[in-house]
Image (spheres, coloured by chain):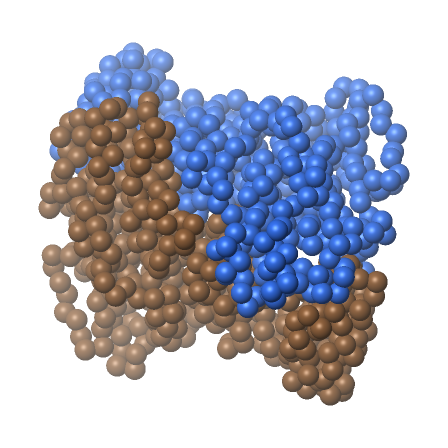
Chain colours: A brown, B blue
Amino acid sequence: MSGTPQSAGVSTALLTDRYELTMVAAALADGTAGRSCVFEVFARRLPDGRRYGVVAGTGRLLESITRFRFGDEELAALEGVVDAATLDWLAAYRFTGDVDGYPEGELYFPGSPILTVRGTFADAVLLETLALSILNHDSAVASAAARMVTAAAGRPLIEMGSRRTHEAAAVASARATYLAGFGATSNLEAGRRHGIPTAGTAAHAWILLHDDELGAFASQVEALGADTTLLVDTYDIRRGVELAVQAAGPGLGAIRIDSGDLGELARQARDQLDALGAVNTKIVLSGDLDEYAIASLRAEPVDSYGVGTSVVTGSGAPTAGMVYKLVEVDGRPVAKRSAAKESRGGAKSAVRRFKPTGTAVEEVVHAAGSPVPVGPHDRVLPVPLVRGGEPVPDLPTLAESRDRLRAALVSVPWEGLKLSRGEPAIPTVFP
Amino acid sequence: MSGTPQSAGVSTALLTDRYELTMVAAALADGTAGRSCVFEVFARRLPDGRRYGVVAGTGRLLESITRFRFGDEELAALEGVVDAATLDWLAAYRFTGDVDGYPEGELYFPGSPILTVRGTFADAVLLETLALSILNHDSAVASAAARMVTAAAGRPLIEMGSRRTHEAAAVASARATYLAGFGATSNLEAGRRHGIPTAGTAAHAWILLHDDELGAFASQVEALGADTTLLVDTYDIRRGVELAVQAAGPGLGAIRIDSGDLGELARQARDQLDALGAVNTKIVLSGDLDEYAIASLRAEPVDSYGVGTSVVTGSGAPTAGMVYKLVEVDGRPVAKRSAAKESRGGAKSAVRRFKPTGTAVEEVVHAAGSPVPVGPHDRVLPVPLVRGGEPVPDLPTLAESRDRLRAALVSVPWEGLKLSRGEPAIPTVFP
């Protein structure tokens, strides 16, 4: 949850749409800036036939809010965007409101009040862009990653998609996939910043650099130990496996196959490794894997998967589509009322109802001021996150959020874990 | 091209896959680290039936390479990842090789040698992850954006997708869309960092904050002037247009419609505005627009488009799929030779052939050491970008790269500008 040495103190205030600031300027001018407001983050729908979404990015958001300050450089950049009175106001700005929300790692469904921001209009509207950027990105990646974890059925997953997404999004993607149950990432900055285990094997370039494959393998084993992972598909895979065991001995840690018919190749490699006495050598598969490809490999002798492109791009849903809507002004519910994209006004809370067996049944989204009965197996979903502008003490660690998601997925009705397109795993009910 | 005040000096070295560093460690140990290597960035194919790709991110990459240094904090994070000798080597590391590549804003096709990195193995392999992250992200966004610019047929486009992508990717997305011909962005940091014009209107929250729509419009006009853009679809659009003109007078700058049947609503609003005497008031449309929706609005009275989700997510192709492959070691061509994902070895250059009319005919990708004839209408595509680790002088500005793309698109055969899926606009030929 803590910032990196390099990001601590760096302002996040300009990672914002211009209209947030011009609205503040106009609201300061007409006296509405101080009206007491409630904004709500929710998703109108889940992407693309998905059964559930995973809330991710909350920890990053709370940390980013504390850096949402306008220093001299930010103010200089806003000359001409807003007037002098607004610049003065921004110079003193820090968020002083309250935030409640679904804890990171919780599931969400259409209409779930994922985040509720209370403050003056000016206080709270400024956070819109940043909050959505972080939650939409991280939740999209975590939601895709969780499906892959389910598909992998207990086999470890390594996130290796940094090269397929923006260099800073890569760090956040590593965090989101770890939250969702991946075991490690290739991204070193994610290791430093978020304490996520890092892993790596070698590239085809490593093999091609050397005069022959055996020499490349031998050097890698010499430098990194026999428990390293040797990439065997640069030339002929069968020959590659043979040379890998020759270089490392039967104690070789793992081989990686990155191309071809992965299931067939895994079976052949397993037989070959066993015949060579390398019975404990693991098989790592990579190469354009997504949740469907992972699921199709369930019966094959695979030990772990490296996943890149598909997970960092949300496997077809690169953004979660959450919105940040004003739902209450001075205690009065408000909502857009034209035909399309209608919203429900009023601050809300939510209860998830469960069977005594622990299986989720429905998501009850209700007016915050009109609580619904909470049975012994039910759970009130939003928790306090920020009070008076400060993150509450003892927010969950990334590891705790990871545990939360694992437990939440166990509660989903079994149809809700299917990879096929369908309805949300549980209905959202608005009493 | 210059770093921001806040990013200047911040190391980019850990925005890297772990295996790049362990390969360097192993190469330092076995003496291959100093072998003279050529790496090439190319795309095996264009995404999803696309006709062309747009090279974007080069300027950001060159700036990031100058910050690819391992300081004390980075080295501390690498304890346990690589050995002490490698840490010493990294402490002294700066890239000292050469880079050539397609200039930013140039088109590319399958197999185009988009970037060629020459250096020792250790020098050049370290840049793989960062180079691909930047080029894959920015090119994906620019490639989608260019199609939208074509679809808009001269009408201005505003990028407003920050909330739908990672908060740092949002800044890069704004840059890539501007490169592709968008006129402005909502993202303030993109304005500061890259000098891109920023724009904005108001959110539905602005209307809902006020006791009535007329009051909201009047305040906005008071604060921001009559040439502001009023959002008219919060309640009833017809009534909204009426109140907008009442608040601002017939000199109102623009109205924005963000939901509903945009074409039909634009026609109605145009008629209504004209009847109210607001004949110069422009109509801005937004709301889930992509290149197809924009094209379908060509006959409607629209003045500009606000585009969000679709452009920052590459409109179905969120990553460009470029790879960074070792193609030459000590002057010897190398290439992966197993069945799948085969590559062509050897350093390459490329010439694009044109008809005398200026229409592109083919992309000739040839061995760097075997030049092909270059006719009077042809163009050699790669240019020097880095020499001895330093960016060459007088690299193109973002505005110049924007002009380059505009000119390049004019050269594409007309079928190549179609939005429908198809083959690349010109074939890639390997003589």
Q: Nearer the viewer, residue B414 or A32?
A: A32
> Which residue is at a point 81% across and 36% down the rendered structure image?
B364
- Left or right for A233, reference B104: right
> Which residue is at a point 26% across and 81% down the rendered structure image?
A356
- Left or right for B163, reference A150: left
Counting from the top left corner in percent of width and height, residue B134 is at 57, 44
Quadrant in the picture for the C terminus of chain B: top right
Quadrant in the picture for the N terminus of chain B: top right
Is the residue B193 above or below the residue A309 in the image?
above
Task: Count the labels in the image.
Answer: 0
Counting from the top left corner in percent of width and height, residue B388 is at 70, 39
In this orientation, does residue A319 appear?
A: yes
Counting from the top left corner in percent of width and height, residue A236 is at 81, 68
- Left or right for A90, reference B168: left
Q: Nearer the viewer, residue B77 or A226?
A: B77
Q: Residue A381 sits in which quadrant? A: bottom left
